[in-house]
Image: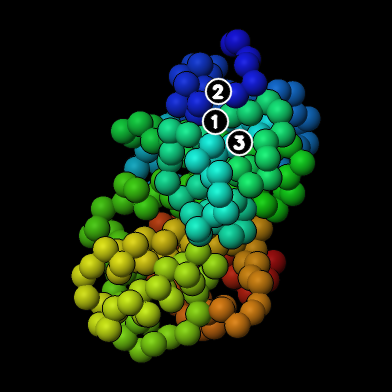
């Protein structure tokens, strides 16, 4: 593969598509540069092993592409909230996202991006100088994004109804900063927050994506929340996670909450 300094993610995906190494029946990976085996294990093998098996019914193949850097060329000005607060994840694929082999400006640097081609998908992770915990969130945030793009409304109905009830009850807080901003915007601009509008649909999608990210990260590494005034209370978080566990059950033997792990031992 010919390496240039900056390559659009779609073009890069075409170049490495047939060179990906299988990780499981669903996942494979490609490294754009040498990565030590122990790093690969932390970045890929452990997170992939904890993904819900139902994911294989949504996609036939997901290729994880590890690259030095990712750059969103559209981010010339200060972000208006288009990236995930934990890990700089693009929430929508843009043709201006590129793989970079040199450090991009901080204002355009992102940690993860996705590309979907019917029932196949690519997850791009920029691994140079990134914290492993952020890369885990980048991976699971990308998987959550892919799930939300393709999961049918019937499967999502129970979760969206739970979110509507939270809106009616004026439940305070959210899972992450992105969904918090969507929720605040909805409540500020719409007198009836459950009325079916673009604002509501945007919030429902973002909230499910953020909650899915937390759910899958919890299956791999345990539930990790940053406490603060914007945080949803633990009772409501647990209710959401238990519902997602019904929609996308974890792999056999994988615990979600610490007390479940304790019971097994």
**Residue 145 in sight in this render:** yes
Q: Earlier in the sequence, mark 2 or mark 3?
A: 2
Q: Please, which residue is most extreme toward the front here? A: 77
Q: Nearer the viewer, residue 10 or 239?
A: 10
Decide: marks 3, 1 in contact (CB < 8 A)?
Answer: yes
Mark 1: few/some/many CA within 10 Å (<14, 14-19, 20+): many
Q: Nearer the viewer, residue 20 or 189?
A: 189
Q: Earlier in the sequence, mark 1 or mark 2?
A: 2
Above or below 4: residue 90:
below
**Residue 263 in sight in this render:** no
Mark 3: few/some/many CA within 10 Å (<14, 14-19, 20+): many
> Image point 54% across, 30% down: which residue?
98
Q: Earlier in the sequence, mark 3 or mark 1?
A: 3
- Give coordinates of residue 79: x percent, y percent: 54, 54
Please tell me whether mark 1 sits on a helix, a strand or a loop.
Answer: strand
- Give coordinates of residue 166: x percent, y percent: 37, 82
The disc placed on residue 7 is 2
> Image point 52% across, 70% down: which residue?
175
Quarter of the figure that contains the C terminus:
bottom right
Decide: marks 1, 2 in contact (CB < 8 A)?
Answer: yes
Residue on which disc 1 sits: 98
- 104 to the left or right of 54: right
Residue on which disc 3 sits: 70
Where on the picture, by quarter, is residue 208?
Answer: bottom left
Q: CA distance from mark 1 to mark 2?
A: 5 Å
> Image point 33% across, 77% down: which residue?
189
Color encoding of the figure: rainbow
């Amino acid at each position: 593969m010919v390496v240039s300094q900056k390559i659009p993610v779609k073009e890069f995906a075409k170049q490495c598509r047939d060179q990906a190494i299988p990780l499981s029946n669903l996942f494979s990976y490609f490294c754009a540069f040498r990565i030590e085996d122990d790093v690969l294990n932390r970045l890929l093998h452990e997170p992939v092993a904890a993904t819900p098996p139902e994911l294989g019914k949504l996609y036939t193949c997901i290729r994880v592409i590890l690259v030095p850097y990712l750059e969103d060329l559209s981010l010339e000005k200060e972000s208006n909230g288009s990236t995930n607060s934990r890990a700089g994840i693009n929430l929508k694929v843009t043709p201006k996202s590129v793989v970079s082999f040199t450090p991009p400006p901080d204002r355009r640097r992102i940690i993860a991006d996705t590309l979907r081609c019917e029932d196949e998908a690519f997850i791009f992770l920029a691994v140079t100088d990134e914290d492993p915990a952020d890369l885990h969130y980048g991976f699971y945030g990308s998987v959550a994004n892919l799930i939300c793009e393709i999961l049918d409304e019937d499967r999502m109905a129970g979760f969206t109804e739970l979110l509507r009830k939270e809106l009616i009850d004026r439940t305070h807080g959210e899972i992450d900063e992105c969904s918090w901003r969507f929720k605040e915007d909805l409540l500020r601009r719409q007198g009836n927050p459950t009325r079916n509008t673009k604002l509501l649909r945007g919030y429902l999608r973002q909230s499910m994506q953020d909650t899915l990210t937390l759910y899958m990260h919890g299956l791999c590494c345990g539930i990790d929340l940053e406490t603060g005034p914007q945080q949803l209370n633990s009772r409501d978080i647990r209710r959401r996670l238990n519902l997602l566990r019904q929609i996308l059950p974890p792999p056999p033997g994988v615990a979600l909450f610490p007390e479940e792990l304790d019971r097994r031992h």
